[in-house]
Amino acid sequence: MIKIKAPHEIEAMRGAGQITAAVFERLAEAIQPGVTTAELDDIAARFIRSNNASCSFWHYNGYPAHICTSVNGQVVHGIPSKQVILREGDIVSVDIGVCYRGYHGDSARTFPVGQISPEAARLIRVTEESFYEGLRQAHTGNRVFDIGAAIQSYVEKNGYSVVRSLVGHGVGSSLHEDPEVPNFGTKGRGARLMAGMTLAIEPMVNQGTYHVNTLSDNWTVVTADGKLSAHYEHSVLIRDGEAEILTTC
């Protein structure tokens, strides 16, 4: 069931989103060669808790960390570890969920580690741009698949592929709510967008094939061909006009 949020719920989600965005500001300073993904997890967890909020991902369906850190060919759900040391030229996708006053903010970005290749930088840029292509379709009167169709068209026009087995979602008092928000599909299909809906739109874009595999930890999703992947996500509020990004300062 799709939930339409009341004004007090939206205000709580803005609070969660502001904390989420502030975590990214701190991690952007910390992400550099030689840092472990466990250190990033610790920075995020301490900051979130210091703001009277909690980490949405901590023990969610058994997930063993506070944030997700996915390096290079890892698409999503990479588990932070002391053994994973970021190297010059890597890219790392960081996915963060914050629960504040009972409501969630969910957001992801892909960061360069030191100097990266032009190819990796272009992948990050196109992934972010594809989010905004989808965002332009996220308003009342349109349908859910209008978002995904716009993302898919932009990504494929730039020579990349969108992951099909993982999608965006509604977000609110639960981390994952209806409806699913695919990053692909046929325009004009899916649930009609209504004011007060809150969605996590999150293109996951691969350099090569859209096929993915899950590692033996049962969490980390990787590209099937070993090529790079990037991720960009915001929680947004559907309105009559342009959608409002909630996970921003």
Image (cartoon, grey):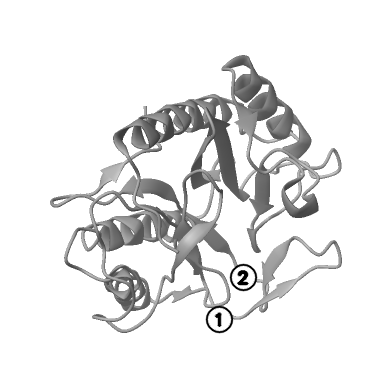
Q: Point out residue 85 in the picture as x, y percentages from the top left corner.
A: 77, 41
Q: In percent of the image, x 77 and y 35: which residue is there?
A: 38
Vertical position of residue 187 compared to residue 133: above or below: below
Comparing labels 2 and 1, the label whose residue is closer to the camera = 1
Vertical position of residue 18 compared to residue 105: above or below: above
Q: Quadrant of residue 137?
A: bottom left
Relative to residue 94, is residue 184 drawn left or right? left
Q: Quadrant of residue 148?
A: bottom left
CB-based contact (under 8 Å), mark 2 and mark 1? yes
Read off the residue under disc 1: 209
Vertical position of residue 35 compared to residue 61: above or below: above
Q: From the viewer's side, name the closer residue of 247 and 229.
A: 247
Q: From the viewer's side, name the closer residue of 95 and 138.
A: 138
Q: Quadrant of the N terminus?
A: bottom left
Q: In percent of the image, x 56 and y 70: which residue is there?
A: 166
Q: Point out residue 21 in the picture as x, y percentages from the top left corner.
A: 45, 31
Read off the residue under disc 2: 227
Q: In percent of the image, x 30 and y 35: which residue is there?
A: 7
Q: Which mark is residue 54?
A: none
Residue placed farthest to the top in the image?
A: 50
Vertical position of residue 104 compared to residue 15: above or below: below
Q: Point out residue 202 in the picture as x, y percentages from the top left corner.
A: 45, 58
Relative to residue 191, is residue 93 drawn left or right? right
Q: Residues within 10 Å of mark 1 (few under 14, many from 20)?
A: some
Secondary structure of the residue carrying numbered label 1: loop
Gap between marks 2 and 1 measured at Cα: 8 Å
The three-letter amino acid code for the residue at tag 2 is: Lys
Q: Point out residue 227 in the picture as x, y percentages from the top left corner.
A: 61, 70
Q: From the viewer's side, name the closer residue of 244 and 190.
A: 190
Q: In percent of the image, x 57 and y 30: which residue is there?
A: 27
Secondary structure of the residue carrying numbered label 2: loop
